Image: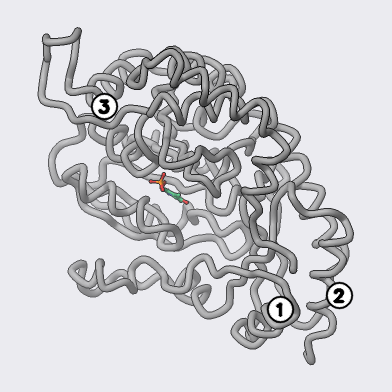
Amino acid sequence: MIKFLDLKNQYLNLKPEIDAAIAAVIDDASFVNGPPVGQFEAAFAATLGIEHCVGVANGTDAIEIALEALNLPPSSEVVTAANSFIASAESITRAGHRVVFADVDSGTYTLDPVDVERRLTPRTKAILAVHLYGHPADMTALRILAGRHGLRLIEDAAQAHGALFDGLSVGRLGDVGTFSFYPGKNLGAYGDAGAIVTQDQALATRCRMIANHGRVDKYNHEFEGRNSRLDTLQAAILNAKLPCLEQWVRRRNEVARMYLDQLRGVGDLILPVVDIRARHAFHLFVVRTERRDDLAAHLRSSGVEVGIHYPIALPRLRAYAYLGPGTECKIADSFAARVLSLPMGEHLADADVAMVCDAIRQFPW
Ligand SMILES: *Cc1c(COP(=O)(O)O)cnc(C)c1O
């Protein structure tokens, strides 16, 4: 059986470090905002080469809090990708704004700047780019667009720990970036966790206060915030795992290279494209085929775990029926029936990748 993801294996490889980190938090009994939280924020910021990092409870809150901290006028339109996990769009609505979906590029699966421009109105105040599957969006084009129209630029980097664009980490290419440490992400906690990163000190402070009851100090609250702090136990676990991130992302790229070499020209497969300006973080390795459901069934019966990200484009979800007509995104809509995610992660040996590729070649194309 070739696993899609293997968190148990990852834990066993780091067991002494992780067990010690957890024991230290319990021993110290500083369960909320204990020392590991600040340590992780500083270490993650340094790893990414970004000035400020604010730990929060999860990646969805990270987007919502970042949007709130930007102080956009209520009910502003925020343009985001039609092909993503619902959290990207949901947090726009939760922050009191309006979701506007734009289509994505058929090569990189990220926001198409030309379609974004088509969806702008006088009410548009921000663009929320998603570095989907770990591939950075075209931040050069989006930054030019944002500059020209006076828009704020937010990066949902929940799937892109380790990705670079023009040599810079995702999360420092716009005004503010957000990460998720959901267990299955490239860097995952043992529960929910997230972070906001930015070069803007005032924005970081506002995010930190929103996430901690609008606090100045213990019983002095400047405004009404909320409770969305990074849990100390999760921070301790992330501290133990962070030193491995770079080698894990490198291995993901090696696995991707093997897939690309071994699957070229097989059936009608469309393989992922990497922009020459980008380092892909390969959170997911997604192929497209007209025969997706049959291939998925064949792989599952051959002992290969696969996933579908995502089976329904966001504008087609019941949750977004309220947006009414005009949400058509031709490319994103066409992906739902065709995308297939192959096993990806540092847990895969070269032989595992070869077995997946063999199974794909054996499919009666
Ligand atoms: C995982 C994910 C999120 C949300 O993160 P959570 O920590 O699960 O709240 C947001 N956006 C994208 C693209 C994601 O994949």
Task: Say above or below: 51 vs 274.
Answer: above
Q: Amino acid at mark 3?
A: Ala
For residue 318, which quarter of the picture?
A: bottom left
Q: Secondary structure at mark 2?
A: helix
Residue 358's label in the rendered image is 2
Query: Which mark sits nearer the N-terminus, 3 or 2?
Result: 3
Q: Secondary structure at mark 3?
A: helix
Query: Which mark sits nearer the N-terminus, 2 or 1?
Result: 1
Does the CB distance between marks 3 and 2 fall below 8 Å? no
Q: Secondary structure at mark 1?
A: helix
Q: CA distance from mark 3 to mark 1?
A: 43 Å
Q: CA distance from mark 2 to mark 1?
A: 10 Å
In this rendering, position of residue 48 left or right of residue 114: right
Residue 240, horizontal then vertical, whole percent: 61, 26
- Confirm or reject: label 1 Cβ below 8 Å from ligand 1: no
- Residue occupying image coordinates x 87% and y 65%: 354
Image quarter (top left, top right, bottom left or bottom right) of the C terminus = bottom right
Residue 299's label in the rendered image is 1
For residue 249, which quarter of the picture?
A: top right
In this rendering, position of residue 323 left or right of residue 7: left
Q: Residues within 10 Å of mark 3 (few under 14, many from 20)?
A: many
Q: Amino acid at mark 1?
A: Leu
Residue at the spot of label 3: 211
